[in-house]
Amino acid sequence: MVFLKMADVILLVTCSIREKAEQTIWNRLRQLKALKTKRPRSRVPLRIGILGCMAERLKGEILNREKMVDLLAGPDAYRDLPRLLAVVESGQQAANVLLSLDETYADIMPVQTSPSATSAFVSIMRGCDNMCSYCIVPFTRGRERSRPVASILDEVRKLSEQGVKEVTLLGQNVNSFRDNSEVQFNNAVSTNLSRGFTTNYKTKQGGLRFSHLLDQVSRIDPEMRIRFTSPHPKDFPDEVLQLIQERHNICKQIHLPAQSGSNRVLDAMRRGYSREAYVALVHHIRDCIPGVSLSSDFITGFCGETEDDHLQTVSLLREVQYNTGFLFAYSMRQKTRAYHRLKDDVPEEVKLRRLEELITVFREEASKANETSVGHTQLVLVEGFSKRSSTDLCGRNDANLKVVFPDAEVEDVTNSGQKVRAQPGDYVLVKITSASSQTLKGHVLCRTTMKDSSVYCLT
Ligand code: 5AD
Ligand code: SF4
């Protein structure tokens, strides 16, 4: 609140994916309105802006409804912010909610606000063409477009020079990445489409694909961990799986959003695969990448979901035994296919009860899956002190699971066994002694590097 009181301009970055995300913004706006009205006349007036998907979805409606809002900028209009702010400065409201076919912010290098940050996100593509029937993303973020490979590699190189140890490649559909800005070459990369996956749109041809990008990114710094999110199950060709298996610095962790375990619901959601195709993909991934960690997204109470459909989702959770899960109650969004053609007929309390049931099953299965780490030695990237105790350090393993361990003096195996204390950004080996559904605990053995650790982590 202190910083808010000092600010002359407050820009809220917003999300529209569920009603709840928007509700949070309306509540925040109410607080900011109070701040704006209480502002002494001696100071410049406080300006409030809404950026991102809510600006895109509601457009002028926000300006009419919230007279306190001065500025609106959709997800593709951030370059226009200086002009919009100048208009606002002159006392008028300003808006730009135009969606673009090619904006990827490729030449804009984000500033790391925390110089000691060990991890960074790198945006590689924007938008989505999938048109799942429940999802507003294609309407707020626009058409799928990929950022040129060269510009992504440039950003990752800079992050490596700054000491960043983990990069997550980010986008709505990262593995559908296709950079057509480079010289076209004959692209013989396979897809999953032969394995029972279909798309709601015409597949694009040519260009540099995700496997190429992943390969190039992972070669920049062998001590930098590479992750990616969020992918779609339809785009996991063997080239990508092989690369994840082979490259020691690409984390063996895959997010595989299923959304439902019922074929009837998957069909209504227009996900483009059946439960059987999805499960076959899970087996294929586990065959290609032994020990891979899997996570997923699920929606409860989608239009027409019966108790039997819900039980099929429960059984999918049991069958796959994910390590991590992201679970949501369905929230009807305007403009989507479901809004126009289906009925939001599952009562709120039933959606929430099913959500609770899924959370319980997820936790049980994740606990069992994580239990298999106990007794093993894992490579952990240290993030800092644990939130709960200043005598414990906290970091993440390859599977992106939180690992907590006492802060102790350890040998640095890469520096002739010198005694050190682990710092954020260091890799350490941790012997895992206990596991829950969300966290592992253990004790630290030594400080190391990713390269040296491959010798020890086989135990
Ligand atoms: N209601 C609830 N959850 C949704 N998601 C997307 N749209 C909706 C919606 N209308 C979830 C999906 C997606 C994740 C990012 O958000 O599970 O994978
Ligand atoms: Fe939304 Fe993801 Fe489906 Fe795209 S693939 S429409 S972002 S749920």
Image (cartoon, rainbow, N blue to C red):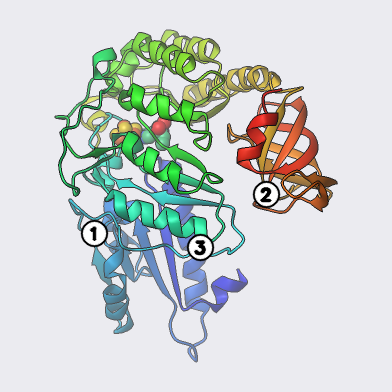
41 is higher (above) or lower (below) than 416: below
Tell me, yes or no, whether the two marked residues, 2 and 1, touch with CB atoms within 8 Å: no
State the quadrant of the N terminus: bottom right
Write down the residue under mark 1.
Answer: 97
Q: Earlier in the sequence, mark 3 or mark 1?
A: 1
The answer to whether residue 342 shows anywhere in this view is yes
3 vs 1, front mark:
3
For label 1, the SS is loop
Q: In the image, is the residue at mark 3 within 8 Å of ligand 1 by its beta carbon?
A: no
> Residue 160, percent across and down?
50, 55
Write down the residue under mark 3.
Answer: 112
Q: Nearer the viewer, residue 37 or 317?
A: 317
Write down the residue under mark 2.
Answer: 426
2 vs 1, front mark:
2
Mark pair 3, 1: CA separation: 27 Å
Q: Earlier in the sequence, mark 2 or mark 3?
A: 3
The answer to whether residue 261 shows anywhere in this view is no
> Residue 377, percent across and down?
72, 29
Q: In the image, is the residue at mark 1 within 8 Å of ligand 2 by its beta carbon?
A: no
Residue shown at 28%/63% (left/top)?
64
Name the amino acid type tagged 1: Val
Residue shown at 50%/92% (left/top)?
42
Name the amino acid type tagged 3: Gln
Name the amino acid type tagged 2: Asp
